[in-house]
Image (cartoon, coloured by chain):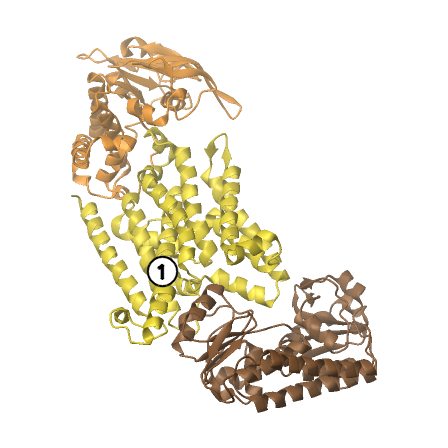
Amino acid sequence: MTLELRDIIWRQGGREILHDITLPFARGNVTAIIGPNGAGKSSLLRLASGLSTPTGGRVMLDGRSIATLPARKLARHRAMLTQESEAAGQFLVRQMVMMGAGMAAHRLDIVQQGLLADALVRRVGLEDFANRQMMTLSGGERQRAHLARVLMQLEVAMTDGTLPGFLLLDEPISAQDPAHQALVLQLACQHARRGGGVAIVLHDLNWAAACADWLVVVHRGTIHAQGPPETVLTQDLACDIFGLRQGCVHRHEKTARPFILPHDNIDEETDRCTSP
Amino acid sequence: MVDKPAHHGRMEMGRRLFACLLAGGMLATPRTGWGAEEDTVTDCRGRHVKIGPARRIASIGGTITETLYALGAQDRIIAVDITSTWPEQALREKKSVGYMRALSAEGILSLRPDLMLAMNDCGPPPVLDQLMASTVPVVFVDATPSEDAIVARTRFIASLLDARTAGTRLCADISQHFDMLTQWRAAHPTTKRVLFVMRMSNNRPMVAGTGTAADAVIRLAGGSNPAAFEGYKILDQEALIGLQPDAVLTMEQDAPQVRAALLGNAGFRLTPAGRNQAIIAMEGERLLGFGPRTPDAALELARRLGGTPA
Amino acid sequence: MTGAMSRATWLFALLGVLLILTMLLALDTGATTVRLRDLWHPAGAGGEMTQLVLRDIRGPRIVMACLTGAALAVAGTIMQGLFRNPLADPGLAGVSSAAALATACIIVLGGSGAWVSWLGRWAIPCAGIAGSFTGMGLLYLFATRGGVTSMTAMLLAGVAFGAFSGALTGVLIFRANDAALRDLTFWTMGSFSGATWRGIGLLVPFLLVAGGLAAYLAAPLNAMLLNEHNAHLMGYPVERIKSLSMLAVACATGPTVSLVGAIGFVGVVVPHLVRLVVGPDHRIVLPASAMLGAILLTGADTMARTLASPAEVPVGIVTALLGTPAFVWLLARSHRTGIA
C-alpha cells in the first residue's frame, strides 16, 4: 500500500500555500521533507495525514482517496506526531501511551496493552518516567512520550495482521538533545525496515541527509527537488534554496552521504551566495 | 362602578345574612351532637375529612391564623406559616413551617398536629398528597377574595373548632363592619378611581388589574379600579396618565419607596392622585387577606377615599 | 496493576460503602421521629406513619437526590472534558437557563391552554425538559458549520444564551404576582420536597440514555484531552463525540433541573475532587463522580430538611454554602500547584 499526494493544491485564507504537489510515500522508505521556513512542509504532512483537506487534488491510500475512509479505519494505516502536542497534564506517561491504542483497544486485553506500552516506553528511553505525570516532564521528554503513543497506535493495528502503517512525524527531534535525536530517528528507520512507510519533516539538513532514503525539498509551496540525498543535497541547492555559503556541503567519507557545515567561523564575513 | 342607593344597602345586608345562614347550613353535616369528639366536615375541595377536638392546629395561611386568633383559639395553634403576619405574636410564639407554597411534609408531620388547616392555594402538590395520605386530618379553606367568602370562611373555621359562640360573635362583628361600610358608601357615593400599586420596578409601578384581591377590596370600599387588564402589569408613564387615578393604594411595608418613586414620576404628577399626592398606605395582609379584619380595612379605605381621616 | 488503577479500586470500594451508608442515614433521619428500625418494629398505630414517611416521603427524596447528584456530576465531568476547562459547568450549555425560562413561563403565565391543564402538575417538568433540549439544540446548530462543531463558539453562544434567557426570565418575574414570584424563587433554589416515585419514573429513561452515552464516551474523552486533532488522528469520530456529549449533558441536566430546580456547584466541584485523587482518566472519573455526586447531594438534602425543621431550606442553598468554600479551596490549590 502506498500513501500518495496527487496534484495537491492547498489554499488557506486567500493564499495559495501549496500547488502541484505529487508525492508518493513508498513503504520501506524513510522520506524526509526539508525546506526553508514557511515553505509549506508541515502543511504537506497534515494533508497527507488527512487532518487538512486539500483544495484540489487527492490523497490516496492504496488507490482510495482518504476522504472516503472513516477516521477509525484510517487510523490503522497511518499515525502522526504533530508539532503541537498538548501537555496532557495529569495523565501518567504509561497511561497516555496506552491511549494510543485508540478505538482498536478492544483487540488486546489490558495486560497485553500494558506490555506493549511498557516496551514502547522503553524504546523511547522513558522507562524511568513511566509512572510520572506528563506535566512533570520536560518538552523533549513529552515529545518522546507522544512518539511512543503514535507508535503504539500502529503497533496495535499490526496485531491483527495489518501491514505496518505510515508513520508521519512533524519535527520529531525539535526538542531533543543530540543523543535522543539519534534515538528518535533510529526508531523511524527501524519502522521503515519492518516494511512501514515513514515521512519526516525536518529542519536539520544533516539529520535529513543521514537517515533519508528519499529527500524532498519543498520551496515556495511546491516540490523543488526530490531524490536520494546524494543527488538532491548539492551545493547549488544549499545556496539557492537555503541561502548558505559556498563550500558548506561536504561528503561523509564512510557513508558517502552529504553533510553541511554552515559556518567555519561565525565572526568572519564569508563569501555569501546571492539570496534565494 | 355604580353606587348603591340606600335600599340596595338593605338588600346587601339581607344577602349577607342569607349567605351566613347558607354557609352555616351547608356545613351542618351529620353531627353526633354538640361537643362531639369526632366530626366529618366537607372542605372546599369537596373532601370529607374526619376531625377530632383540634387542639394542635397547624395553621397554613395568614387569614386562617388571623381568624383563629380572632376566635380566641390561639392556644390551640402549634405552628403557622410565614404569611401569618397578623397578629404579630403569631410568628413569634408559634413554630414556623416556612412559606405556604413550599411546605415540608415531614416537617409538618413531626409536629404531630391533630388538624392541618390550609388555604386552598398552598403547595407544593406532592407534599399535600403526602400529608393527605397521613393520619393527620387536612382541611382546605377556600381562598376566594369576596365579602361572602369572608363570612363563609369564618363560619367554617369556627365550626371546625366547635367554637360556635365565638364564631357567631365574630360573624356578627364582621357583618356589622360590612353594614357600616354599606351605610358609609350609601351616604358618601363616590366615583373615585383607585389604583393599587404592589411595588415599583425600575421606577415604574406594578399595578393590580381585575381578578386580584386588591381589585376586590377597592370595589368593596366603593372605589373603581381603572385598570382593566387581568392580573398584574407594569405601567409606563403614558398608561398611568391615561388611567387618571384619583388615589393610589399601596402596602405599608413598601410605602416609602412607592411614595418616593411615584412623586418623582412626571407622569404621575399629571394625574389627580399625583396632583393631590393622594397615596394611601395600609397594612398588606389586613387589606388583601380577606380575613376578619378586611371589612374594617375596607371601611377605613372608604373613609380615606372620601377625604375623611380613618 | 499500576498505582492509578489500584487507587481507583480502593476509591470505588470506598465510594460504594459511603453511598450505602449515606442512603441509610438519610432514610433514618428526618423531621419526624421515624427511624429505620421502625420497619422491623412498627409501633402499632405509628406503623402507618412509618410506612408513609419512609416509603412516600423520605424514600423518593433520597432516590431523587442520588440520581440528581449523579446526573449533575456526570454532566459536569463531560463538560469539563469536552471544553478542556476545569471550570466548565453544565449550566454553560444553556440547558439550565432554557429549563429555567420554560419553567418561569409556566409558573408566571399560568395555566392557560388546554395542554397545560391536561398535564396538571407535570406541566412544569415537561416544559422544562422541552425547553432544555430546545436550548441545547439551538446552541448546537449555531456552533456547527459544515459538520464541524466549534466548542469555542458553543461556549460563547452558551454564555450569551444564558444571559438572554435570564433577561426573558426577568421580564416574566416583573409580570409575576407575589405567589408566582415566590414559586419561581424557590424553584431557582432547588428542592427535593416534591420528589415522587412517578417523577423518578419520568427521570429514569433520560438518565439511562445519559449513562449509556457516558460509558461510550469515556475513552474518547480521554483522547479529546490531547486536543481534537490528535483524537481525530487516533481514529476517534470527533464530531460525533461532540454531539453525543452534548446530548448526554442535555439528557442528564434538562429533566433533572426541570423536576428539582437549579442546584449549583455539584457539576463543577465533584469532578475536581475526584480527579484530585485518581487523575484524569474519564473511565474512572465518570463513574466515581456519579457516586460522589450522589453521596454529596443526598447528604445536602438530609441537612436541608432537618436544619430548619419544621420548615425546609432549599437544597440549592446548602450546596452553595458548602460548595463555595470547596470551590475556592480547589481554585487556590490548583493555582498553587500550577494546574488549570
Tell me what residue is drawn at x 48 percent, y 41 percent: C154
Q: Of residues A269 and C310, which is closer to you in this image?
A: C310
The residue under the point 32% across, 40% down is C222
Q: Colour of chain C?
A: yellow
Q: Amino acid at mark 1?
A: Leu
Q: Residue B279, relative to residue A130: is it above or below?
A: below
- Above/below status of A133 relative to B43: above
Residue depicted at 32% across the width and 52% down the height: C290
| Residue B306, percent from left and from top | 80, 82
Residue B20 on image: x %, y %: 66, 82
B299 up-or-down from C86: above or below: below
Q: Nearer the viewer, residue B263 or B211?
A: B211
Q: Secondary structure at mark 1?
A: helix
In the figure, residue B127 lies in which quadrant? Answer: bottom left
> Is B47 placed left or right of C291 in the picture?
right
**Left or right: B96 as drawn, with respect to A64:** right
- Give the chain ID for the orange colour: A
Q: Position of residue B13 (x, y in %)?
A: 74, 83
Give the color of chain B as drawn.
Answer: brown
* Residue B238 at least partly seen: yes
Residue B304 visible at all: no
In the image, farthest residue toward the top = A231
Query: On the rendered image, what quadrant is the N terminus of chain B found in?
Result: bottom right
Within-10-Å neighbours for mark 1: few <14, some 14–19, many 20+: many
* Chain that bears disc 1: C
The residue wearing badge 1 is: C297
Q: Position of residue B296 (x, y in %)?
A: 68, 84
User: Of residues B101 and B195, which is closer to you in this image?
Assistant: B101
